[in-house]
C-alpha cells in the first residue's frame, strides 16, 4: 500500500538533493492533452543527473511513495497524470537533456531522456544522419517518453518503432539501482532483454534516464505523393506494389479519408484535398531513395502500374521539398480538425493487414446500428495501424452521445479483437485503457506482466495504476 | 531445489500424454556440436501440440523436475545439454513442425517451433517472399531454437536478428499456462514486452511453441562481390559508402581474413581466395536491389569510389547467381576450416563500430604476450560482430595450450568489455558463458534478470543452469 507524498517525506528527500530539485508542480506537470484527467497539486522532482534520479527512487521506495515519471507530457492515454489514489511525486526528466555523445561513423548517438525528439533529430541532422522517429508532438515530446511508450509515428513502416531504434538504455529501477546499459551494439545476446521490457512499460518498471539510438543515412531523395485510391483494399495492394518497385524503401504510407477534409472545411481549417472532386480514400506515400534510382520515374511507375490495375484513380506528386512538406502538412492537420469537431471516442487500433479492408468496410454499419455517427478513419496503413475515431452526426455534439459512447467504444475494440488486432497500436495503455487491457488481454500474458511488475517494483511505486490496475 | 526426473514421475506424466510421447533420449538429444558437454541418459518428451507441452510443464512444475527445451540442437554454448545437477527431462519440439498459416499479402506466416529454419525459408519462397534469417546450420536448426536464442547470422545488417523478425509467439510458461500471442501485428503497445523477454531467454523463461514471423519482398537482384581491402578500418568506411550508394540495401558485409584461407589450404579444404595474391583482409558484400536500380553499376560505383579513396585494393564481382553462391560458400567454409585446425578458444563478440578497427589492430599483440597463437578474425562486420577465434601456432596442438587457454579467453573478453562490447553477440550465454556473464554483466541488470526468472519460473524448472547459474 502506498503512502501520500507528505511534507515529512519531502523534507527528508530535499535534504538528499541539490537545492531547487524539488518544486511545486506546474500546470504542465498535472495535465494531459486530452484534458480527461487532472493531476492534484503536489511536488515535482527535477533531477539533473542519473545519480539524483537514483536518490529520488531510493527514498520513494523506502517510504512507499508513488512516482509518476514524465517526459514532455504529450501522451494520449493519461500515463503522465495520476488523478486518484495516494498523492504521488511527479518526476520530470526535463532537466536531463544533454547529448552525451554522437558517433556518425557508427550511426549512433547517446542522449539523455529529457531531450525533445526534435532535438534528437536535429543532433543527427547536424552530422548528416537521420533519426527517423517522427510524430506530430516531436517539439515537446521527449525521447525518454518516446521510449517509455514505444512511440510509433509516420516512419515505422521502414524504420520501426522507438524500441527498434534503441540500442541501449540507462535505467533506474524502483529501488534506485542504476542499470548502465548504454551499449551501442547491434547485437548483444547476453541474457534477458531487460531493455525492451523497460521500453514500452510507460515508466512502470523503470525510469529511463538515457538511451543509445540508431541513426541512418539520410536518403538522397524524398518522393511524396497523395494518391486517390479505389478503396482501402486497393491501397494495400498498392503498398505491396510500391514496396516491390522501390526495393522496400517506402518510408510512409498513410491512409486519409474524405471525412478528414470535410472536417477541415467544417471547422474552418485551411487544409483542402489536392483534388477537384475529393475522393473517398487517399494515401500519402513517401519514398526515400538513393541517387542511383530515378526517383520520379520510380514513383511514376508505381502510379501508372497502380492505375492500370485499377488501384489508383488520380494523384498529386510533389515536385519540390516544399510541396512534399505541404502534402505532409495536410496529413498532419487531420488530428487538429478532429479535435475541433470533438470525438465521441478515439481508437488507436492495429489489425493484421489482411483484415483491415474488411474491417474498414463493415465496421461503420455495425456502429451506426448503435448511434448516428460520423467516422474518421485514417493513419499508418502500412503498419496496419488505424486511428479510428467516432464523431457526432452533423449538427449534434459529443455530449449528445453520453449514453452510447461506452457501447460504441466497446464495439470498436470487440471488432478489432475478433480479428486478432490490438486495442492500442502505438499510444499505449496509460490509465485510460487499463480496464480494456484487463478485459481483452491474454490471461497468461497478464499474469506474466503482473509477476514481472511485482518482481521489479515490489511496492508498486513506479507510475501506480498505469498499464496494470492498482492492486 | 529440483528433483531427478525419476520413474514414478515419468509414469504419472506418461499417463497424461498420448502413447509414444515419452521416449528414451537419443544421442542427438544429449550432445552439442562442440562436444564439450554431454547429457546423461534419460527421457525425452516429444509433444505434438501446445496442449501437450502445457501438460508436460504442469507436471514438471508440480514435481520440481527440470526441463531442457530443445530445437535442432545446433547451439554453440551448451544451452541444449544439461550435464550436471538433478536429471532433467529433455523437451524436444521436433514433432511440432507445422505451417499454421501464411499470408503473402501481409508478409507474414505462422509456424510451429519445431520447423527447421530452412523449411521456413522455403515456405516463404513458395509464395514469392523472403524470410531473411540465414545461418550455416539452417537445415537442422529450428525456428523455435532460433527465437529462443535470438539468432543472428548473415542478413542482420538489413533485416535484423530473429527477435526483430518475429511479430508474435505462442509460449508455455513454467506452470503450464499458455500465452496465445500469435498476433500478426507490426504495432501493438498493450503492456509489457513479454514476447521479447521470452525470445532470447534460451528456454529459461518459457517454451516457445509457435511464432508469427515477418516476411519481405524478394529483392529483384542480388549483387555479391569479394573485395580486398586495405584494413578493417577501411572496410568500415567502405560500408558507410556502400550504404549511402545503395540506399541502405546492403544485406551482407562479412569480414574475411587471410588466416581463414590459409587454414583451408592447411586442412585440405578446397576453398581458395579469389585473388592471385591473398590479401590480409577481404570483405564479402551483398546488395539486394530492386530492378529500378542498375545493380552492376551501383556495385561498380562502390568499388571505384572505394578504390579512389584507397579503401579497396582489388575485387571479384559475381556475374551470376552461381558465382554469388560460390563466393558465399567460401565465406561459409571458414568455420569448417577452423574446426579442422581446432581452436584454443572461440569468441563471439561485438563492439561499437568505432572501436572495431583498433581492437582488431591491437588485440593480437596483447594476446601473443600470453602465448604463441594464430588468430582467425572474421564475421558480420556490418553488425560489429566478430568471430575472434584463437588457434595453435603452426605445428602445435590445442592441447599444448591447456595452461594458457583460460587466460587467453579472459583477455579477449576483458578487451571487449573495456570497449563497451559484448561477450556474446549472437550465440547466447547457454551454460558455457554463465560465469562470464556473472563476471562482466551490469549488476543491476543481473539482479533484474534474476528477479524476472524467479517471477516467471519460481522453482527454476526451465533449462536449469542456462543463462543464470543454478541457485
Image (cartoon, coloured by chain):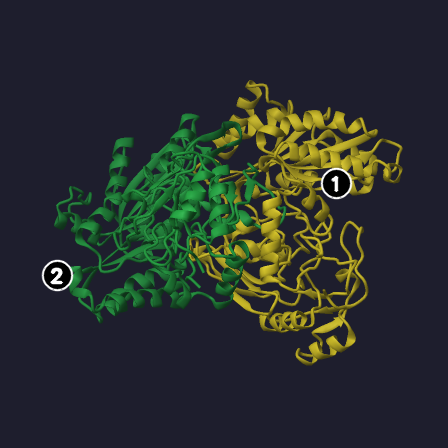
Chain colours: A yellow, B green
Label 2's element?
A: loop
> Whole-Å distance between the Cαs marked 1 and 2?
71 Å
- Compared across the picture, whether A306 is left or right of B353 comes to right
Tell me the mark number nearer the camera, choosing from 1 and 2.
2
In the displayed structure, would residue B72 be above or below residue B231?
A: above
Please tell me in which quadrant of the rendered image residue B331 appears: top left
Q: Where in the figure is residue A125, as x and y percent of width and height?
A: 54, 54
Can you identify the residue that label 2 sits on? B396
The tally of labels here is 2
- Residue at 64% across / 47% down in the picture? A135
Measured along the vertical axis of the image, is residue B154 above or below residue A146? Answer: above
Outermost residue toward the left? B395
Q: Is residue B139 left or right of residue A83?
A: left
Q: Residue furthest bottom?
A: A15
Side (left or right) of A373 relative to B82: right
Helix, strand or loop for disc 1? loop
For residue B257, say whether it is visible: yes
In the foreground, B311 or A447: A447
Task: Give the residue at mark 1.
Answer: A346
**Percent x, y of residue B289:** 41, 35
In the picture, residue A230 is in which quadrant?
top right
The chain letter for the residue carrying disc 1 is A
Q: Which residue ends up furthest to the front in the rendered image?
A: B8
- Up-down: is A301 above or below B16? above
Task: Report crowding for label 2: few under 14, some 14 to 19, many 20 or more residues within 10 A (C-alpha).
Answer: few
Residue A181 seen in the current view: no
Q: Chain of mark 2?
A: B
Residue drawn 14% across and 60% down? Answer: B397
Q: Are marks 1 and 2 on the same chain?
A: no
Amino acid at each position: 500500500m502506498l503512502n501520500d507524498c507528505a511534507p515529512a517525506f519531502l523534507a527528508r528527500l530535499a535534504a538528499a538533493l541539490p537545492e531547487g530539485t524539488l518544486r511545486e508542480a506546474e500546470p504542465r506537470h498535472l495535465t494531459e492533452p486530452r484534458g480527461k484527467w487532472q493531476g492534484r497539486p503536489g511536488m515535482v522532482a527535477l533531477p539533473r543527473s542519473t545519480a539524483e534520479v537514483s536518490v529520488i527512487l531510493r527514498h520513494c521506495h523506502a517510504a512507499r511513495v508513488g512516482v509518476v515519471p514524465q517526459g514532455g507530457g504529450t501522451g494520449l492515454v493519461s500515463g503522465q497524470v495520476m488523478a486518484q489514489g495516494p498523492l504521488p511525486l511527479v518526476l520530470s526528466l526535463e532537466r536531463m537533456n544533454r547529448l552525451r555523445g554522437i558517433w556518425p561513423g557508427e550511426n549512433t548517438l547517446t542522449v539523455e531522456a529529457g531531450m525533445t525528439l526534435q532535438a534528437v533529430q536535429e543532433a543527427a541532422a547536424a552530422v548528416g544522419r537521420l533519426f527517423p522517429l517522427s510524430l506530430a508532438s516531436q517539439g515537446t515530446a521527449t525521447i525518454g517518453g518516446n521510449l517509455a511508450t514505444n512511440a510509433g509515428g509516420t516512419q515505422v513502416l521502414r524504420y520501426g518503432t522507438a524500441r527498434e531504434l534503441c540500442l541501449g538504455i540507462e535505467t533506474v529501477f524502483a529501488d534506485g539501482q542504476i542499470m548502465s546499459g548504454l551499449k551501442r551494439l547491434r547485437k548483444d545476446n547476453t541474457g534477458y532483454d531487460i531493455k525492451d521490457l523497460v521500453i514500452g512499460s510507460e515508466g512502470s518498471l523503470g525510469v529511463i534516464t538515457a538511451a543509445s539510438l540508431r541513426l541512418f543515412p539520410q536518403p538522397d531523395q524524398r518522393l511524396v505523393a497523395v494518391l486517390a485510391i479505389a478503396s482501402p483494399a486497393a491501397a494495400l495492394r498498392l503498398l505491396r506494389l510500391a514496396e516491390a518497385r522501390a526495393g522496400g524503401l517506402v518510408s510512409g504510407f498513410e491512409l486519409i479519408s474524405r471525412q478528414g477534409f470535410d472536417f477541415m472545411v467544417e471547422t474552418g481549417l485551411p487544409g483542402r484535398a489536392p483534388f477537384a472532386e475529393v475522393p473517398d480514400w487517399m494515401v500519402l506515400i513517401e519514398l526515400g531513395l538513393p541517387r542511383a534510382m530515378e526517383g520520379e520515374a520510380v514513383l511514376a511507375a508505381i502510379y501508372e502500374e497502380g492505375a492500370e490495375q485499377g488501384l489508383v484513380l488520380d494523384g498529386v506528386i510533389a515536385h519540390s521539398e516544399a510541396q512534399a512538406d505541404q502534402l505532409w502538412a495536410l496529413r498532419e492537420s487531420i488530428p487538429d480538425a478532429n479535435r475541433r469537431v470533438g470525438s465521441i471516442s478515439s481508437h488507436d487500433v492495429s489489425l493484421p493487414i489482411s483484415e483491415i479492408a474488411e474491417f474498414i468496410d463493415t465496421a461503420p454499419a455495425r456502429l451506426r446500428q448503435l448511434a448516428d455517427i460520423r467516422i474518421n478513419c485514417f493513419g499508418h496503413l502500412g503498419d496496419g495501424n488505424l486511428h479510428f475515431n467516432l464523431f457526432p452526426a452533423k449538427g449534434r455534439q459529443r455530449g449528445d452521445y453520453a449514453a452510447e459512447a461506452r457501447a460504441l467504444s466497446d464495439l470498436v475494440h470487440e471488432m478489432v479483437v475478433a480479428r486478432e488486432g490490438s486495442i492500442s497500436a502505438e499510444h499505449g495503455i496509460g490509465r485510460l485503457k487499463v480496464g480494456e487491457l484487463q478485459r481483452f488481454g491474454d490471461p497468461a500474458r497478464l499474469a506474466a506482466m503482473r509477476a514481472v511488475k511485482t518482481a521489479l517494483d515490489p511496492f508498486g511505486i513506479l507510475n501506480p495504476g498505469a498499464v496494470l490496475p492498482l492492486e
